[in-house]
Image (cartoon, rainbow, N blue to C red):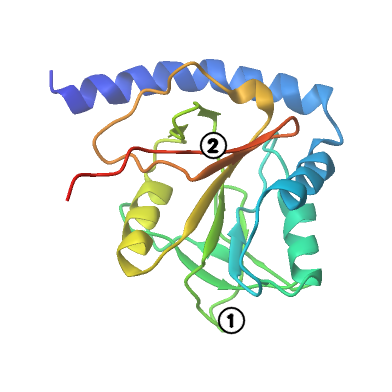
Amino acid sequence: MSDTLIIDQQKKALRKEAKKRRAQAFAALPDAATVLRDRLFETVDLPAGAVVTAYWPLGDELDPLPLLQALHQRGFRPVLPVMLGEGKPLIFRGWAPGDELVEAGFGTREPAADREELDPDVLFVPLLAFDRAGYRLGYGGGFYDRTLEKLRKLKKITAIGIAYADQEMDSVIRGPYDQPLDWIVTEREAFQITRPRQAR
């Protein structure tokens, strides 16, 4: 069995536990989205007027829409992700509160094809679990890892994982293609990920 297949199987088992933790946090913390929004503004210095994106919330995911709406009010340029198909990076189209969205499958929604396509400067990334090294356990599709890898080759971006504090794990299993985050923000705290500089 290849190392990649072993990692995939280990992640699959962890996702069950992570989903259980998230569901419990969702039930216990109905105001987490607004608390997280306020904590982020107090802690993270975002570039003025930046193009920002977050996911459309599903089920018991922590809702990023109060944050995205507040960013719009403060002069940032929100976009939402659009899936182009399996194995492909996401693209992003313009969005403002009140815009009509189209059904995109899996229960999610996205801007219509006539909206402007922009590359985000700041991405608020969904996750099932995270660790203090900035690695996340995603849903297994690899969309955000491919997207972060692509964008980081184009320009400087900031990837921020938003989650309930109880979604933290001691160490998230990571594969060779997993992209680390730059910040983690929860309803309890916000912390920046520091990494050793690479030798030149």
Q: Nearer the viewer, residue 39 or 172?
A: 39
Q: Please, is residue 33 above or below residue 147 in the view?
A: above
Q: Residue at x 59, y 75 (%)?
A: 112
* Residue type beneath disc 2: Leu
Q: Residues within 10 Å of mark 1 (few under 14, many from 20)?
A: few
* Contact? badges 1 and 2 (CB < 8 Å): no
Q: Residue at x 60, y 65 (%)?
A: 52
Question: Residue 91: image x %, image y %?
Answer: 45, 67
Label 1 element class:
loop
Left or right: residue 134 compared with residue 19: left
The mark that comes first in sequence, 1 or 2, is 1
Identify the residue under disc 1: 115
Is residue 15 in view from this perspective?
yes
Left or right: residue 47 compared with residue 176: right
Identify the residue under disc 2: 127
Q: Nearer the viewer, residue 16 or 37?
A: 37
Q: Nearer the viewer, mark 1 or mark 2?
A: 2
Q: Residues within 10 Å of mark 2 (few under 14, many from 20)?
A: many
The N terminus lies in which quarter of the figure? top left
Label 2 element class:
loop
Is residue 97 in view from this perspective?
no
Question: Residue 167: image x %, image y %?
Answer: 61, 24
Q: Residue at x 17, y 51 (%)?
A: 200
Q: Please, is residue 156 above or below residue 138 in the view?
A: below
Question: Residue 75: image x %, image y %?
Answer: 74, 75
How far apart marks 1 and 2 lie (CA) works out to 26 Å
Left or right: residue 11 compared with residue 48: left
* Residue type beneath disc 1: Arg
